[in-house]
Amino acid sequence: MSKVALVTGGARGIGREVVIQLAEEGYRLLVNYNKSEEAALELASILKDKNYPVEIFQADVSRQDQVRAMFNFCMDRFGTIDILVNNSGISYEGLITDMEEDDWDRMMDTNLKSVFLCSKEALKHMLSNHSGKIINISSMWGQVGASCEVAYSASKAGVIGFTKALAKEVGPSGINVNAVAPGVIMTDMMKEFSQEDIDYLRDETPLMKLGYPIDIANLVVFLASDRADFITGQVLASNGGFVI
């Protein structure tokens, strides 16, 4: 029986490409979405037309009750969970002095608390199986920080710390925990940036080009595979050399 992967925020952007690539690798998939129902339904339709086993589930992954319901659904439909990709995330650009407390809380809940909640539920099954892989999507700004993205940088740095600590905690149980730290990736998040900003970011990237969701999906597929069985607690970067 093929392995089961759950991808949070899997309807759009990086998450969508991760879902597609995992499906093509033969995984059974549960695609989480929160507000992007139309995109989730469209993606599921495309994959089911190719006879890929995929289900979708609406849940706010910053809410414990909804996360539990999602994992219960996963177990009911597939009977197991082998791969968890914590991909859900939001961005915020602006001075920290202009940021409201509610904005900070929403950032931490979506980008960091969700990783805790989903990992905790996944581990209930992975620990008893003595196997499993958790892959967390961080950011290069979690590695070095970005001006006017303090909250985002802090949340993604938290994901890196969480990854390293959890890898030590569950490694003896045969579970791998790793993170991917994307650079500038052309997704919907980039709509907030002007063409001038995008050109600047491209010029600052040693490879002189920006990334696409497939660049991150390729790393996720590798980390999910048996080829990465001896890799844990690591942060793999796909950033074109922006952060070295």
Image (tube, rainbow, N blue to C red):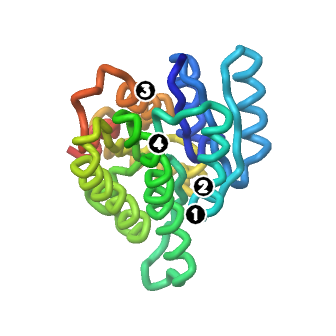
Q: Are the residues tagged 4 and 1 within 8 Å (C-beta)?
A: no
Tell me if 15 is positioned left or right of 170 in this view.
right
Pick the front one: 190 or 28: 28
- Disc 2 marks a residue whose amino acid type is Arg
Q: Nearer the viewer, residue 94 or 137?
A: 137
* Of pointers 4 and 2, the one earlier in the residue sequence: 2
Q: Amino acid at mark 4?
A: His
What's the distance in space between the residues labelled 1 and 3, CA to CA?
Answer: 27 Å
Local crowd size for mark 1, using a 10 Å CA cut-off: few (<14), some (14–19), many (≥20): some
Mark closer to the chain start, 4 or 3: 4
Quadrant holding the N terminus: top right
Disc 3 marks a residue whose amino acid type is Val
Which residue corresponds to mark 3? 221
Camera-nearest residue between 78 and 85: 78
In front: label 1 or label 3 = 1
Disc 4 to disc 1, how far (Cα)? 17 Å
Residue 68 numbered mark, or none: 2
Residue matched to label 4: 125
Circle 3 — which element? helix
Image quadrant assignment for residue 51: top right
Task: Name the front one of labels 3 and 2.
Answer: 2
Tags 1 and 2 touching, CB below 8 Å:
yes
Point out which mark residue 64 bears: 1
- How far apart are the alpha carbons under marks 1 and 2? 6 Å
Residue shown at 50% from the left, 24% from the top: 3
Residue 109 image position (x, y, % from top left): 51, 67
**CA neighbours of label 3 inside 10 A, class few (<14), some (14 to 19), many (20+):** some
